[in-house]
Image (cartoon, grey):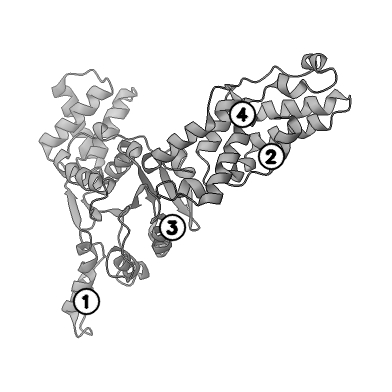
């Protein structure tokens, strides 16, 4: 394929057209145009080559691999229909095959290939930056077919690159540096976590999975458990979307968008509680159960709260004399937590469990100290911190490992 043909065909991509929006690919296309415009002045061409390599090198020296990574993670019609028997349709699939052949040629192009057709091409090599690397034996069509088979676990687009997201103005935004917490790093509460793990495995297997409420005392590892699940099962196709309480009204639209995605999603609401007149209360009730739209089987809601019944209720609420059906009102306030199919309680640890957690964390952090002395300090630290909890234990051990005198 000539440089002119490659330049024209690169601009006529259809299914994989999103690749052209990448800066490195845009610089590559600009370099091709500079080669076609070459009339003897090497400066514009050298500038275009340098611009391409400047964009390439932060990602790697192997252009074939960098371009293939962009191709494999592109969000497009064909990858979205990779799990349907008919694919995206005959025309789309045909254009995909053509696009892959064009990008195969682009990813195999060397600096020598670019300069060879030009007058004095051999001499031009000495005026150019050092050449990038290529790997022509990579077969893009084969690699792409393998990726399409992996979509239920690897995902596509941003879901292939990231596994934790937030919701920003209704748009999923990836978290580039999520909490790396793993389940193995959370000592204690194994029985409680096992229930949540089994429910999550059911979700990943396409079986009926419950919405989960993690309720209990502060600092007992409720939020850490959910984050660790996302890290633990990322390779199995699990993705986590954190949603703030004021964003609850956006959840129905989000769930509709995710319904056809082959991955599985946990919609995570942290530290959930409501006032009695909070509009978000009714919105979440409808989302969990009761709206005309059924919940997709690839989505589950996991929420944490320090309140068993989620709604703040005062004594005056219970003694208000102007509510004719006060009992019905209390039932309404309590009904939200009942709509979580699974409620798991994380209670403040007793002395024995607290000791187990401290000793485990100390061993992981390499703290060398007699156990009786370690626990005496840990108890004193917990007393100053307001009581025993896994969070307090972690803070104590990390400070001790950092050399802080406690």
Q: Return the residue at label 2.
A: 9
Q: Return the residue at label 4.
A: 107
Q: Height in image: 336 above or below 369?
A: below
Give the distance between the C-alpha atoms of the residues marked 2 and 3, in whole angstroms.
33 Å
Crowding around mark 3 (Cα neighbors within 10 Å: few <14, some 14 to 19, many 20+) is few
Give the distance between the C-alpha atoms of the residues marked 4 and 2, in whole angstroms.
13 Å
Quarter that holds the C terminus: top left
Residue 395 position in % (x across, y down):
29, 34
Identified at 25% across, 37% down, the residue is: 392
The disc, 1 or 4, on the residue closer to the chain's N-terminal end is: 4
Give the distance between the C-alpha atoms of the residues marked 3 and 4, in whole angstroms.
33 Å
The disc, 3 or 4, on the residue closer to the chain's N-terminal end is: 4
Residue 129 position in % (x across, y down):
73, 19
Give the distance between the C-alpha atoms of the residues marked 1 and 4, in whole angstroms.
66 Å
Mark in the foreground, 2 or 3: 2
Q: Height in image: 318 above or below 115?
A: below
Disc 1 element? helix
Residue 119 position in % (x across, y down):
85, 20
Q: Return the residue at label 3.
A: 257
Residue with the most extreme right position: 40
Marks 4 and 3: in contact by CB < 8 Å? no
Q: Return the residue at label 1.
A: 329
Name the image quarter holding residue 399: top left
Horizontal relation, residue 14 to residue 153: left or right: right
Disc 3 element? helix
């Amino acid at each position: 394929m000539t440089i002119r043909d490659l330049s024209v065909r690169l601009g006529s991509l259809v299914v994989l057209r999103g690749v052209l929006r990448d800066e490195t690919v845009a610089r590559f296309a600009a370099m091709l145009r500079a080669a076609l415009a070459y009339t003897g002045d090497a400066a514009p061409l050298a500038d275009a080559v340098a611009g391409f390599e400047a964009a390439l090198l932060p990602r790697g020296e192997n252009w074939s691999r960098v371009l293939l990574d962009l191709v494999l993670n592109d969000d497009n019609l064909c990858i979205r229909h990779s799990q349907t028997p008919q694919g995206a349709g005959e025309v789309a699939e045909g254009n995909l095959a053509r696009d892959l052949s064009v990008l195969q040629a682009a990813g195999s192009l060397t600096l020598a290939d670019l300069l060879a057709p030009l007058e004095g091409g051999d001499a031009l090599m000495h005026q150019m930056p050092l050449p990038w690397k290529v790997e022509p034996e990579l077969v893009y069509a084969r690699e792409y077919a393998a990726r399409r088979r992996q979509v239920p676990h690897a995902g596509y687009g941003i879901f292939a690159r990231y596994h934790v997201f937030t919701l920003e103005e209704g748009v999923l935004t990836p978290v580039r540096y999520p909490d790396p917490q793993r389940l193995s790093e959370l000592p204690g509460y194994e029985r409680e976590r096992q229930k949540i793990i089994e429910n999550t495995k059911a979700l990943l297997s396409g079986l009926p999975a419950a919405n989960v409420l993690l309720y209990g005392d502060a600092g007992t590892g409720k939020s850490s458990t959910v984050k660790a699940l996302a890290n633990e099962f990322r390779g199995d196709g699990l993705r986590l979307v954190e949603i703030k309480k004021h964003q609850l009204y956006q959840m129905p639209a989000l769930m509709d968008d995710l319904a056809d995605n082959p991955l599985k999603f946990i919609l995570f609401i942290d530290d959930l509680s409501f006032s009695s007149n909070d509009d978000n209360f009714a919105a979440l009730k409808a989302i969990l159960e009761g709206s005309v739209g059924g919940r997709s089987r690839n989505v589950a809601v996991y929420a944490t709260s320090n309140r068993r019944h989620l709604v703040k209720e005062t004594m005056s609420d219970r003694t208000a004399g102007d509510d004719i059906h006060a009992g019905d009102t209390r039932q309404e306030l309590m009904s939200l937590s009942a709509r979580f199919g699974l409620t798991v309680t994380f209670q403040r640890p007793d002395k024995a469990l607290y000791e187990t957690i401290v000793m485990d964390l100390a061993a992981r952090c390499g703290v060398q100290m007699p156990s009786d002395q370690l626990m005496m300090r840990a108890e004193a630290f917990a007393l100053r911190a307001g009581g025993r909890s896994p969070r307090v234990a972690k803070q104590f051990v990390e400070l001790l490992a950092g050399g802080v005198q406690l």
